[in-house]
Image (cartoon, rainbow, N blue to C red):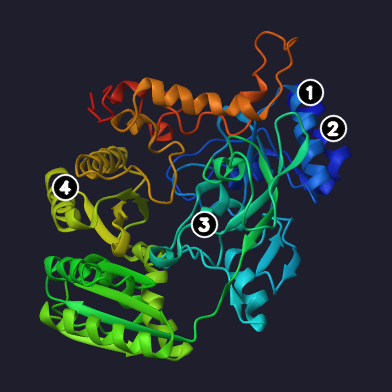
Amino acid sequence: MPTNTRSLVTDLARAVGDRYVIWKPEDLLVYEYDGSIDRATPQAVVLPGSAGEVAEVVRIANRHGAYIVARGAGTSLSGGAVPLRNSIVLALTRLTALIEVDAESRVAIVEPGMINLHLSQLVSHLGLFYAPDPASQKTCTIGGNVGENAGGPHCLALGVTTNHVLGLEVVLADGSLTWLGGSQRESTGYDLRGAFVGSEGTLGIVTKIAVRLLPKPETIHTMLAAFRTMDAASDTVSGIIGAGLVPSALEMMDRKTIDAVEPFYHPGYPADAQAVLIVEVDGLKESVEEQTEVILEICNNNGASEIREADDVATRAKLWETRKGAIGAYGTIAPTYYLVDGVVPRTKLREVLQQVDQIAAELNVTVANVFHAGDGNIHPAILFNERNPAEVKQAILAGARILEACVAAGGALSGEHGIGIEKQAYMPLVFNEDDLDAMARLRTAFIHEDPDQPIGVPSLAERFNPGKVFPGGAVHGEAYGITRESFRPTGTTDWQ
């Protein structure tokens, strides 16, 4: 171990205990990855057991001039938890407590390492639940959801993470601990809480989260409709929204995804189905019945070949299991996936999905689709073998062209996965240099820089999650031999 790392590890061990500092090369391997295709080895990993220990770790890192990457469950799909620049990984998986529940005010305070699904389970007996529900909710942490402003199938009607976070306790770059927002639903002044949600760990480290809880709906009705074409399914989505309905969830899977989930879950979808829609409505019984009638009519008018319905918990879970398990099931088709996250206007859904098919055909890549159709948040999954460098390059090129298509259609680069390493080269497609500069300068609002900072030591503003979000920070796919010269200034790729 290098002398500088040995000194750092010694100081970290004093702060949190020997067993909670990881530094051996063979142990660091599991922290090189998150859910993306990028990787980097950390200098060390530390697992603090309290907010105070988090703050002390930050102060120690500052003394050593080290970078810090906060990590939850490592499910980020844009490289958010990949430790660039030999960073310390600050893993928050020991901080899992439900600190307080105010059932009357419908507010809970949790630690960032709490698994998303666990919160709803812990407050279920109070008739409450936590709304944001990423597909990885059985694994992902609420702290990680805050960092990426995660969504989920039910964000169409209920909103994404930022709509459910009231306040945050955070450790800033100088090691100070403070609250932004609180446990009240309204606050005055600048919305600093809102700035933190979705900041991808670049502004500070969250140590407590005050979230709002919602009452369980009186009635929930889930429908699954199979269609012979993607166009018919897309038209059904437009028809449902055009009828003035906002279902709690409106999800779509294509034929390749159907083929992937069949061996795992045996749903028995029609052999001629090219798309499956899952539509869920909830609320008062009478309202749900009225909405269900309209939705079923729209599905039938668009040629649905089969419709399944469910009201009870077990049967609804059965309808949902293929959607929730689709990403893992892609392993039946290829060993690696690159899950693109883009947003398009609902009116352009059919057009962009056709473009995705064209891109896949032109580049000879396999693309499966499973996504939040109701809000136009598409997730083309590019399936490939990471051991084949040519396939990696084609996958990244396909992802670039899909993101360009989303932006050209009037959409956005990300709906819920963030920018991270993956999309930073494409930021100029959406933002000019002044925009990017203004966003980068936001970091300095949360710190007090040391005027005597030694030359060559990274400033406090750069300490958290370095090399993420902004162009030039890192290269998507660098571990596979891809270089910065592979990217044109516009954000597209041009392999030399």
Q: Residues within 10 Å of mark 4 (few under 14, many from 20)?
A: few
Look at the picture and state if 209 lies above or below 394: below
- Residue at (61%, 40%) from the top-left corner? 192
| Whole-number angstrom distance, CA of label 3 to CA of label 2 | 39 Å
Q: Percent from the top left, x then y, of residue 14?
A: 88, 38
Of the two numbered discs 3 and 4 on the same chain, state the one appearing first in sequence. Answer: 3
**Dot 3 corresponds to which residue?**
163
Residue at image position (47%, 89%) is 314
What SS does tag 2 mark? helix
- Can you tell which of label 4 and label 1 is closer to the viewer? 1
> Which label number is shown at residue 63?
1
Query: Residue 107, how many percent across, how many down?
Result: 67, 66
Horizontally, residue 257 falls left or right of residue 414, namely left
The label on residue 364 is 4
Q: Which mark is residue 136?
A: none
Mark pair 1, 3: CA separation: 37 Å
Of the two numbered discs 1 and 2 in the rendering, the one whose residue sits closer to the viewer: 1
CB under 8 Å between discs 1 and 2: yes
